[in-house]
Structures are given as structure tokens and as C-alpha cells.
Image (cartoon, grey):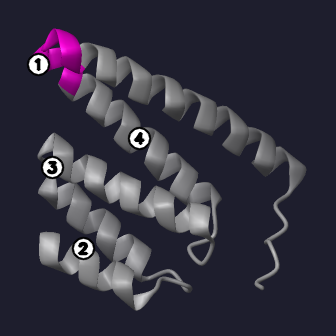
Amino acid sequence: MKKKEQIPKETQQRLDELYSQLTSAIHDLQGIIRRMLDSEVEEGKRKIMTLEEEIANLTSPSSAEGLIARRGAIRAAIAVGDKEHAKELLNRFLAQDGIKADFVREFSQLL
């Protein structure tokens, strides 16, 4: 069993805050989608993309939560229709140590 990575207390507190904001943003987006307000949907998707990117910046690419955040940031960029930004994120993430081959395959096919 792989030992859980130790995260500094300040970083963990920031991550907890970001996860809370991310959960709220997702719930907000779900409500907006139900009301079908296009401009707000776009804004909600961009907010999710930004939060996922910030979480990715604070987590290790070799950790489960880091990989999930990186996937989320790229998927959110694609959902917003910003493939250029998604490609930039993919290239930035690929340059990090600890990125797994399945991550590369998954997004190389999408972009």
C-alpha cells in the first residue's frame, strides 16, 4: 500500500477551502443549468476550471487528488470551449514528474 503524501498544514487548509469552493461552484452550476442561463453556465464552468487549476498547482501530480484536479482543469477548459488553454494545461502538466501514461493517452485523444 502506498503511503499517503504529507501535506503542510497551511496547504491542507487552503486545499480544504478550495474543495469547499469547488463543491459550491459545482452545485451553483447545476442550479444554473437547470435554469438554462447560458451566460451564467459559461461563468460557472470558468470558475470550476480556475478552481481545479489552483488545486492542481497545490497538489502533487503523482497523488490521486493531484491527478483528479489536473483532469478536472483540462476537462473544464474543454467544456468552456477553450481548447488552446486545455492544450497549454496538458503541456504544463506533462512536464511535471509523476504524470502517468494513461493521463497522456486520455487527453492526447481529446485534444
Mark 1 highlights which residue?
38
Whether the magenta-drawn stretch holds residue 69 is answered as no
Q: Is residue 68 left or right of residue 84?
A: right
Q: Which mark is residue 107?
A: 2
**First of labels 1, 2 by sequence position:** 1
- The alpha-carbon separation of the residues under discs 3 and 2 comes to 14 Å
Q: Residues within 10 Å of mark 4 (few under 14, many from 20)?
A: some
- The part of the chain drawn in magenta is 33-41
> Callout 3: 10 Å neighbours few (<14), some, many (20+)?
some
> Dot 2: within a 10 Å radius of its alpha carbon, few (fewer than 14), some, or many (20 or more) residues?
some
**Amino acid type shown at disc 2:** Phe
The image quarter containing residue 75 is bottom left
Left or right side of 45 for 51: right
In the depicted view, which residue is nearer to us: 27 or 16? 27
Residue at mark 3: 82
Would you place residue 65 above or below residue 79 in this image? Answer: below
